[in-house]
Amino acid sequence: MPALALNPRKQSAIWLSVATLFSNQASGLHARERSLMRDILRRLAGAVDAAQRLMMAERIADDPTVPLELVLHLVDDSIEIAVPLILRSATLDEDNLLALIARADVTRKILCAQRAGIGERVAAALAKSDEECVLLALVHNSTAQISSTTFEIVAKKSLRFESLREPLTRRTDLPEVLWTKIRERLPAATRNLSEKGRILTRPNDSSEASGNACKLIDKLAVAGQLGAGFLMRVLLQGQTELFDMAFARLLDLELEEFRAAFYASDLQGMALACRAVGIDRSVFQTVWGLSTKRRAGPRQSGSGQPAALDSLFALPKPEAFARLHACS
């Protein structure tokens, strides 16, 4: 099919019409019609505002009757558009998820690992990853069905990735023999308190949990280990409270002050904050996508205003820090 010679506004209107028709009338379409519509969507996607594509993704994420072709088209879009579909779409069955994992980048694998109720085959495919953040997301997903064979694979990888050990011991479905082995690798203070499926501590209220997080952040800061790498790791693990507290500490802001600024609907404000702490431009879209649910105001794409974003990420870190504080 030759390229369509239409202006961007008309291309966008056609994409939206075809996507809507596809989602509403898929059961009445023949294979040739479905193939043609998929090709039109692919060719015109670049002319469609990312906010429209995100609205479509959110709209169809909870609809099990939506055609697979439309879901896969949007899953391969930018990460913030893929998020609701990978996490929630009932159209994606186990075979679709396995195919996605085989070709996916790290962030999409993390999302697959965080998806509720993933089966043993999907868990086994994710366990083959050598990315610590993917394995952590899998182990932290209490709804994931993990076979004993897959647990053995992850347990072996915990020899290299110490962060896997404690969350593994918290799983009630971890085989007893593996629990015993992993428990012996825990620090003595933790090991002496551990039982199958949990770490024995006195019940924590929210203030105590927050205090423990503050102590952790203090220790990391003193050791010079509190930085962009730590922020990305806890964000990808879904530890948003720790992410917020650590980010606020790095920016020398009060927690609520940080949240009010960071989760506003200002794309450039978030970019400036990321630059100030050393988060790279290449992963900004991931940060934006994973913070979608916590942002106020209308949703927009993290890939918008590329020239303005590039200029912000070109700033020296101290200048970005100073600009951020001047605006707060």
Image (tube, rainbow, N blue to C red):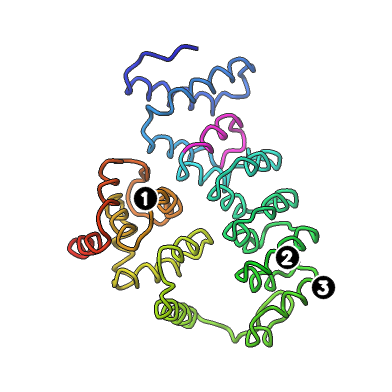
Percent position of residue 262, x then y: 32, 59
The structure residue drawn at horizontal position 39% and vertical position 51%, both measured from the top left corner, is 284
Residue designated by label 2: 156
The structure residue drawn at horizontal position 64% and vertical position 70%, both measured from the top left corner, is 167
Q: Residue furthest right?
A: 177
Give the mark nearest the N terminus, 1 or 3: 3
Segment tinted magenta in the rendering: 62-77
Circle 1: residue type: Arg
Q: Residues within 10 Å of mark 3 (few under 14, many from 20)?
A: few
Please tell me whether mark 3 sits on a helix, a strand or a loop: helix
Residue designated by label 1: 281
Percent position of residue 4, x then y: 41, 14
Give the mark nearest the N terminus, 2 or 1: 2
Residue designated by label 3: 177
The part of the image, by quadrant, that contains residue 300 is top left
Report, in whole angstroms, how far the alpha carbon at label 1 lies from the one at label 3: 44 Å
Q: Is residue 146 left or right of residue 244?
A: right
